[in-house]
Each structure stands twice: as C-alpha cells, then as structure tokens.
Image (cartoon, rainbow, N blue to C red):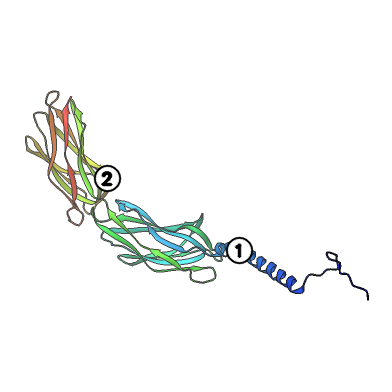
C-alpha cells in the first residue's frame, strides 16, 4: 500500500477558512477607525460658532459719542431688530446709522423712538442677500445730557435675527453701561511770568453748561488782573456776563450762555490778563473760590476745582 506524502510549503497548502475571515474583519475594523478619525475634524469644522451680539460703548463719555451694536460669527443674516433702552436724563440718541459685517453694509430699514428712553431699530439686507462674519448691526450716535459721575445702562430687548430662509438665528445678547466723565476746572497759567501774561480758567468734560461764577484771588503786590475776556468750549463762545474787583486781591467773574443754550465738552470759561507787579522770585497763588456751575435745567454741575501759582522771573 503506497504512502501519500504531503508537501509542506508548496502552493497546494491552504490557510484555514476561519483565519481568513478573522483577518478580513480586522482590516474592516481598522478602516472604520481611520474613517471615523478623519470625519471628526469635518464635524468640528461644520459646527457653527455661537453668535454674539453686544453693545460696544466707551466706558466713560462726554459731549457726544458713538456706540456700535457688535455682532460676531453670524451666518446668512437677512434681517433683524432690537430695542435699545437708556436713561434719557444722562444720554440721548441723536442718530442711528447702518452697520457693516465683513465689508458688507447692513442697511437700516427704519428706526424710531418707542418712548423717551427707548429706540427701536430694524435692519434688513437686500433681497436674497445674506451677511456672514463679524462686524456691526448698527452705529448709534449719542449726546451726553447728565453730569459727571452719572451712569446709564444701554440695554437691548425685543431682539431677533433672521436668516435668508426665514429661520431664527439663535444668539447671545449683551448690554453695556456708560458713565459721564466728571467735570474739572483749573487755573492754567505759566509757571514763571514777567511783564504781562494770560491765564485761562480751564474746564474739562462739562455737559449742558448754562452759567457759572467764580472768584479768583491773587497777591496784588506780585500780579494784578487787567482784563477778563470770554472763554470757549469746543468752538462755542462762553460770554462774560460781568466781572469786577471784589477787593484789591480778588476779581469776581460771572459767565452766562444765551437763553436755552447749553455748551458741552472742554475748553476754558474765561481768559484772564495779568500784569506783573512784584520782583524776581516772588510768588502768587491764583485761588478759585465761591465757584458754581449750572446747567440749562438750573441744576448744579458738580466739578473738581484746582488752583494755580506763578513765580516772577
């Protein structure tokens, strides 16, 4: 009886079927893992960033200022609306201008006062145009009405954003607050003087100034006042109502704006002309007293007052 010899390592040798199946499954699983890892970044990049809208205003304000309604990471914006509320005794809105998102204008469809302390703003892109990216929905122009230290919240309500498919765009909305800069009055004179010289009564960050007064005292043996001339605040003349010598070392000055006119900003209340009477090295303080500022509503304007000093060359 012949013996059958099995050739080891020849092509006729076969791999068990169960082993082939296991290898195939392993290869499929590896492929699935790599496919999943490749897909994760795609999912992350497809997720839209959260849209944020916030009032962007200076923390401290005077005269006039602008605030923007800032928007970040919006997609396909077609239209929107919001109410902006404020304390009209502190600030007031004078105009609302179009915004801009990544170089694309965002037109103001309309805006109006909903009440004395609130404006309603509607924005609307042209038909079938959607804005994408970050920028501003609108630019709001304000004028300051309050006194130094007074505050006003700038609160957004009744807010909504809509895309070109008429679907609401979810967003986080944030308010803001402004504080009116305090008013400061100071004697602005050269440190060293000779012959004749001028000093101004400098004023900074005033709102709605209607009238005021002050006494300016000095050492008449060193310097003497010869004239008091009108001042100027942000290009607006501040008339001298009257001035006179209260005594040999003091002049009293009264200023008064025309009826119902309030002046805003920074400049000077009056310009004082002096002549030098003393000798080299002698000094004179220039002291402010009996001082008061009043707005167009006959309310006192709080201010910090600072004196000066001169030395004869």
* Cβ atoms at labels 2 and 1 below 8 Å apart: no
Judge the density around disc 1: few (<14), some (14-19), many (≥20) Cα neighbours within 10 Å: few
**Relative to 99, does residue 246 appear above or below in the rendering?**
above
User: Which residue lies most toward the left here?
Assistant: 247
Q: Secondary structure at mark 1?
A: helix
Instruction: Point out residue 236 in the picture as x, y percentages from the top left corner.
Output: 27, 45
State which mark lies toward you, 2 or 1. Answer: 1
Q: In which image quadrant can residue 149 be found?
A: bottom left
User: Which residue lies most toward the right here?
Assistant: 1
Instruction: Point out residue 243 in the picture as x, y percentages from the top left corner.
Output: 13, 40
Sequence order check: which comes first, mark 2 or mark 1? 1
Q: Secondary structure at mark 2?
A: strand
Instruction: Point out residue 108 in the picture as x, y percentages from the top left corner.
Output: 45, 62
Q: In which image quadrant can residue 225 be found?
A: top left
Name the residue that disc number 1 marks. 37
Name the residue that disc number 2 marks. 266
On screen, residue 200 versus residue 4, left or right, reads: left
Which quadrant would the N terminus be assigned to in this image?
bottom right
Q: Which mark is residue 304?
A: none
Which quadrant would the C terminus be assigned to in this image?
top left
**Relative to 143, does residue 270 appear above or below in the rendering?**
above
Judge the density around disc 2: few (<14), some (14-19), many (≥20) Cα neighbours within 10 Å: many
Nearer to me, 8 or 115: 8
Structural distance between the alpha carbons of marks 2 and 1: 63 Å
On screen, residue 262 versus residue 214, left or right, reads: right
User: Which residue lies most toward the bottom here?
Assistant: 1
Q: Residue at x 51, y 66 (%)?
A: 78
On screen, residue 194 versus residue 9, left or right, reads: left
Give the total of numbered labels.
Answer: 2
């Amino acid at each position: 009886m012949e013996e059958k010899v099995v050739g080891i390592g020849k092509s006729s040798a076969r791999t068990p079927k169960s082993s082939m199946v296991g290898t195939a499954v392993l290869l499929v699983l590896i492929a699935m893992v790599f496919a999943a890892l490749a897909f994760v970044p795609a999912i992350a990049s497809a997720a839209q960033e959260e849209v944020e809208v916030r009032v962007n205003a200076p923390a401290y304000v005077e005269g006039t200022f602008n605030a923007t309604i800032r928007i970040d990471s919006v997609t396909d914006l077609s239209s929107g609306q919001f109410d902006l509320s404020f304390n009209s005794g502190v600030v007031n809105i004078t105009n609302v201008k179009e915004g801009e998102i990544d170089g694309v204008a965002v037109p103001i469809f309309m805006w109006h006062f909903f009440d004395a302390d609130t404006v309603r703003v509607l924005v609307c892109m042209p038909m079938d145009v959607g804005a994408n990216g970050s920028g501003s929905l609108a630019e709001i122009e304000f004028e300051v009405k309050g006194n130094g230290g007074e505050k006003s919240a700038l609160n957004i309500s009744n807010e909504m954003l809509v895309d070109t498919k008429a679907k609401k765009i979810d967003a986080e909305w944030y308010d803001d607050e402004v504080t009116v800069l305090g008013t400061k009055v100071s004697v602005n004179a050269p440190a060293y003087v000779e012959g004749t010289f001028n000093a101004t009564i400098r004023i900074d960050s005033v709102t709605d100034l209607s009238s005021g007064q002050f006494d300016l005292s000095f050492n008449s043996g060193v310097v003497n006042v010869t004239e008091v001339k009108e001042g100027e605040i942000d290009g607006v003349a501040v008339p001298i109502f009257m001035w006179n010598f209260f005594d040999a070392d003091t002049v009293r000055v009264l200023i008064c704006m025309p009826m119902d006119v309030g002046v805003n900003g920074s400049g000077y209340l009056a310009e004082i002309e002096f002549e030098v009477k003393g000798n080299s090295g002698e000094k004179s303080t220039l002291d402010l007293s009996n001082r008061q500022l009043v707005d167009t509503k006959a309310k006192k304007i709080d201010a910090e007052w600072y004196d000066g000093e001169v030395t004869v060359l």
